[in-house]
Amino acid sequence: MNPLAIREDFPIFQEKINGHPLVYLDNAATSQKPRQVLDVLRRYYESENSNVHRGVHTLGTRATEAYEGAREKVARFINAPSPYQVVFTRGTTESINMVAHGYARAHLQPGDEIVLPPSEHHSNLIPWQQAARATGATLRYLPLQEDGSIRLADVEAAVTDRTKVVAIAHVSNVLGTVNPVREIAAIAHRHGAVIVVDGAQSVPHMPTDVQDLDCDFLAFSGHKMLGPTGIGVLYGKPSLLAEMEPTYFGGEMIDIVELHESTWKEAPWKFEGGTPIIAGAIGLGAAIEYLSNIGMEEIAKHDAHLADLTVQRLAEIEGVTVYGPGPGKPRAGLVTFNLDGVHPHDVATVLDAAGVAVRAGHHCAQPLMRILHVGATARASFYLYNTEDDVDAFVAALKQAKEFFGHAIG
Ligand SMILES: Cc1ncc(COP(=O)(O)O)c(CNc2co[nH]c2=O)c1O
């Protein structure tokens, strides 16, 4: 894998930031877009644009074939048995909300439990708070180890016959921990529970095989994997999608509409009310082709290598705290840190002055920030177009920030 050659495909790396080359290390928030995706979007609007499914004219056929072809690409990418198990949504957040509202609420009652880690992104935490509040079910949080990892023994202890839903990120957007989803799914299934996997930080960065994971639902976002904003995916097992109720209603999704009663199409279309996210889906399909041509194993190794290199380099700087797995322990391609005594927003501002883009804040994980006893953190997150030179530039800028804020260079 040659990140320098890959960078040539991304126009945004021609940008100068405060007079410096862009060092983009905020990929956990959103990824940049290759020309191959941008060109497909332009070509769609220039030669295929139409509404889908009902038109009998040529453009409608072209757009429908492109849209449903994107669904097939997503299904192959996650090894789903059928494209009919791939629902297009606006993103991870909408996907998880659809499960919480359309499936969980119909299956939860007082005394039932939803098991999840406290480190979840708000998009995989608040929907379950709402579902618990609406149904009388209760949330049961898993304990975290010092490095943020989750022990299977603790999952075994927490998941009981009262558990109806286990909700968990495959990769934490703050800690970079990779959770043992396959094993957790087996525990959930032994107790008759379903597992909802938040794949926002895993699907873009590593091979994902929903049949191997045996997850019941999987949610992820196209904008984090070279695709446009506004497109995401909810994967679900056929029997679960069949019994799951749509959460919004209108055109496209219906079979028969009477004045007082209506019936729906089969999944996935019953969940895609209104004009669907046609261009977004087609753009996601192009992004998946780009990623697949490079190879997800290669990308996973590359991202993890840059994260490991960063952890090693930060360990050499006195006054820097790194959160998540320690040196040499498995970590996905992100590193969350703090410069002791300096607000992460100030650190990120100084880094930006040097052209280095990192994320600062609570990363939509406020309960986790409290567990870490911090109000906020900074995070560097890597992808296929980042290089070791990016790590060097980041470390140099951080040392400048340290000097600027009055720390002696360690
Ligand atoms: C683990 C996880 N789950 C869900 C979401 C929500 O995805 P969306 O629906 O596409 O917004 C994110 C986005 N995470 C981040 C967005 O910005 N910084 C982040 O860490 C995430 O990292």
Image (tube, grey):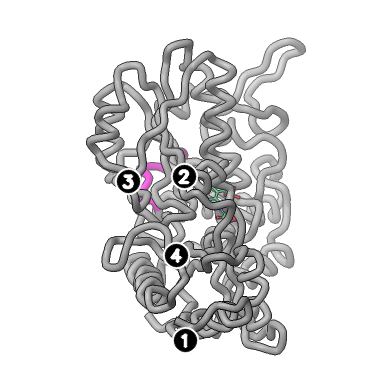
Identify the image quadrant of residue 248: top right
Q: Is residue 92 visible?
A: no
* Front one among 267 and 7: 7
**Vertical arrangement, residue 307 with respect to residue 313, above or below:** above
Q: Is residue 21 visible?
A: yes
**Vertical arrangement, residue 267 with respect to residue 48, above or below:** above
Contact, mark 3 vs mark 4 (Cβ under 8 Å): no
Q: Is residue 358 magenta?
A: no
- Picture coordinates of residue 123, whole percent (x, y): 56, 41
- Amino acid marked by disc 3: Gln
Secondary structure beneath label 2: helix
- Amino acid marked by disc 4: Thr
Residue bearing the label numbered 4? 321
Q: Residues within 10 Å of mark 4 (few under 14, many from 20)?
A: some
Find out if the beta carbon at label 1 lies less than 8 Å from the nearest ligand 1 atom.
Answer: no
Residue bearing the label numbered 2? 371
Contact, mark 4 vs mark 2 (Cβ under 8 Å): no
Marks 2 and 3, the one that precedes in the sequence? 3
CA distance for labels 2 and 1: 33 Å
* Front one among 104 and 62: 104
CA distance for labels 2 and 3: 11 Å
Marks 1 and 4, the one that precedes in the sequence? 4
Quarter placement of the C terminus: bottom left
Secondary structure beneath label 4: strand
- Amino acid marked by disc 1: Asp
* Front one among 125 and 84: 125
Residue bearing the label numbered 1? 389
Contact, mark 2 vs mark 3 (Cβ under 8 Å): no
Which numbered marker is on residue 145? 3
